[in-house]
Image: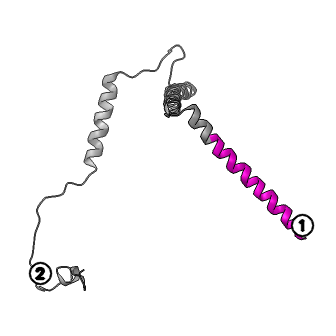
């Protein structure tokens, strides 16, 4: 039983030494290969630009997918002619829709008057106005 526990401790110590040496040697190796961090900087910029490019591709294809699905649904309902190739909306129509939505959402907010009425309270003492609560007992 004692030999087994010693064996487990030795294996554990060996694993910890191996992991510690590997991480230490990897950091030293990276420091030797790229002492000023220029390579890591370039790798970071490349990863960011690739991610931005992928997002651009996703958004461009998303609009095409939405147009394709709307065209299919209109064809199924019979609201679109099969000979018509493209569904397009002019810029003036888009601007009119955007302006109508803006005006509609502006009307949803309540218009409140800016008249304030201040009445003097009959009770002068209030814990809200008491200065004693702002003081500490023993200032140091």
At x 50%, y 27%, the residue is 53
Residue 117 versus residue 8: which sits nearer the camera? 8
- Please state the horizontal and vertical placement of residue 90, each as a whole percent of the image: 35, 21
Q: Quarter of the image containing the C terminus? A: bottom left
Residue 75 versus residue 136: which sits nearer the camera? 136
First in residue order: circle 2 vs circle 1: 1
Main secondary structure of the magenta stretch: helix
Q: Which residue in the structure is indicated by mark 1?
A: 3
Is residue 22 located in the magenta-colored stretch of the structure? Answer: yes
At x 76%, y 53%, the residue is 15
The correct choice, above or below, for 102 with respect to 71 in the image is below
Q: Quarter of the image containing the N terminus? A: bottom right
Q: Quadrant of residue 129?
A: bottom left
Pointer 1 local density, CA inside 10 Å: few below 14, some 14–19, many at least 20 = few
Name the mark nearer the viewer: 2 or 1: 1
Q: Which mark is residue 121?
A: 2
- Please state the horizontal and vertical placement of residue 111, each as a whole percent of the image: 20, 54
At x 72%, y 52%, the residue is 17
Is residue 33 located in the magenta-colored stretch of the structure? Answer: no
Pointer 2 local density, CA inside 10 Å: few below 14, some 14–19, many at least 20 = few
At x 71%, y 49%, the residue is 19
What is the tally of numbered marks visible in this picture? 2
> Would residue 26 appear left or right of 137 to someone viewing this image?
right
Secondary structure found at label 1 = helix
Q: Quadrant of residue 32?
A: top right
Which span of residues is magenta-colored?
Answer: 1-26
Residue 35 versus residue 67: which sits nearer the camera? 35
> Would residue 101 appear left or right of 66 to someone viewing this image?
left
């Amino acid at each position: 039983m004692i030999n087994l526990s010693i064996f487990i401790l030795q294996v554990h110590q060996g694993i910890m030494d191996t992991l510690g040496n590997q991480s230490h040697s990897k950091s030293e190796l990276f420091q030797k290969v790229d002492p000023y961090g220029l390579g890591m900087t370039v790798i970071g910029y490349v990863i960011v630009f690739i991610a931005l490019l992928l997002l651009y591709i996703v958004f461009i294809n998303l609009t095409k997918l939405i147009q394709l699905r709307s065209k299919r649904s209109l064809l199924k309902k019979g609201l679109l002619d099969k000979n018509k190739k493209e569904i397009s909306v002019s810029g003036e129509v888009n601007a009119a829709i955007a302006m109508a939505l803006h005006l509609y959402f502006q009307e949803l907010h309540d218009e409140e008057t800016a008249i304030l009425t201040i009445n003097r309270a009959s009770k002068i003492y209030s814990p809200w106005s008491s200065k004693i609560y702002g003081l500490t007992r023993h200032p140091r």
